[in-house]
């Protein structure tokens, strides 16, 4: 997101870790609701899990003071793991988070889930994806919430107005 302060200056506003965490949580919860009601909607589910992982990884990186743009889950995951991010499933030396992120982000990443394509692809098995993303949410929420000063209000990121024309 970019806003112009005046003709000579460009100010970049980057969302805080809490904003990314909230979005990641919403994408995850939305995917879980859809899974419970219509589990065969796999392109929708994978797209939502992709966005949940992206937002959660960016929440972790932002809480570490790093701003990352783009949608490359493998790169985001590698950087977060280098900074210490671990999910419960990986603490015994596994690579579940890395593998799920790589498979979700393979080829065109989320575009492969949002649009029909004739290209074949490899995807992480859905139950495995759900477990890994749930672990990621717990790990990132715990870290971000432990680094957030709850005595201070955060800076507003945006203001959405929802309208209906009657």
Image (spheres, rainbow, N blue to C red):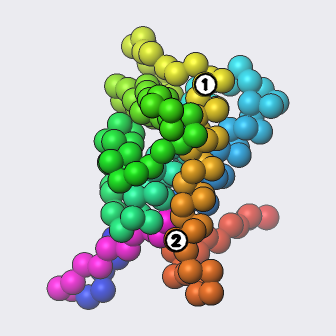
Image quarter in which the N terminus is found: bottom left
Q: Is residue 62 left or right of residue 75?
A: right
The answer to whether residue 107 is visible is: yes
Look at the picture and state if 136 lies above or below 160.
Answer: above
Q: Earlier in the sequence, mark 1 or mark 2?
A: 1
Image quarter in which the C terminus is found: bottom right
Helix, strand or loop at mark 2: helix
Give the mark count: 2
Query: Residue drawn 42% across and 15% down?
Result: 121
* Label 1 crowd bin: few (<14), some (14–19), many (20+), radius 10 Å: few
Q: Position of residue 119 (x, y in %)?
A: 39, 13
- Furthest toward the front, the residue is 92
Q: Is residue 163 left or right of residue 78?
A: right
Query: Residue drawn 52% across and 71% down?
Result: 147
Query: Residue drawn 56% across and 34% down?
Result: 89
Look at the picture and state if 4 lies above or below 108.
Answer: below
Residue 77 placement: quadrant = top left
Residue 122 placement: quadrant = top left
Q: Position of residue 41 (x, y in %)?
A: 68, 24
The residue closer to the viewer here, 86 or 19, is: 86
Distance, label 1 to label 2, CA atoms, is 29 Å
* Label 2 crowd bin: few (<14), some (14–19), many (20+), radius 10 Å: few
Q: Position of residue 66 (x, y in %)?
A: 33, 63
Helix, strand or loop at mark 1: helix
Q: Is residue 80 left or right of residue 161?
A: left
Asked whether 27 falls inside the magenta stretch, the response is no
What residue range appears in magenta?
A: 7-17
Label 1 or label 2, whichever lies nearer to me, is 2
* Residue bearing the label numbered 1: 128
Q: Position of residue 138 (x, y in %)?
A: 63, 50
* Residue bearing the label numbered 2: 147
């Amino acid at each position: 997101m970019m806003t112009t302060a005046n003709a000579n200056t460009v100010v970049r506003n980057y969302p805080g870790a809490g904003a990314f965490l909230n979005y990641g949580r919403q994408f995850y919860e939305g995917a879980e609701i859809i899974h419970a009601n219509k589990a065969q909607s796999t392109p929708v589910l994978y797209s939502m899990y992709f966005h949940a992982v992206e937002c959660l990884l960016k929440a972790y990186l932002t809480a570490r003071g790093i701003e990352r743009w783009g949608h490359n889950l493998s790169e985001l995951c590698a950087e977060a793991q280098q900074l210490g991010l671990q999910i419960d499933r990986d603490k015994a030396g596994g690579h579940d988070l890395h593998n799920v992120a790589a498979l979700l982000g393979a080829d065109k990443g989320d575009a492969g889930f949002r649009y029909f394509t004739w290209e074949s692809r490899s995807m992480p098995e859905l139950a495995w994806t759900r477990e890994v993303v749930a672990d990621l949410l717990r790990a990132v929420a715990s870290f971000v919430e432990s680094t957030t000063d709850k005595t201070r209000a955060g800076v507003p990121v945006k203001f959405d107005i929802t309208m209906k024309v009657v």
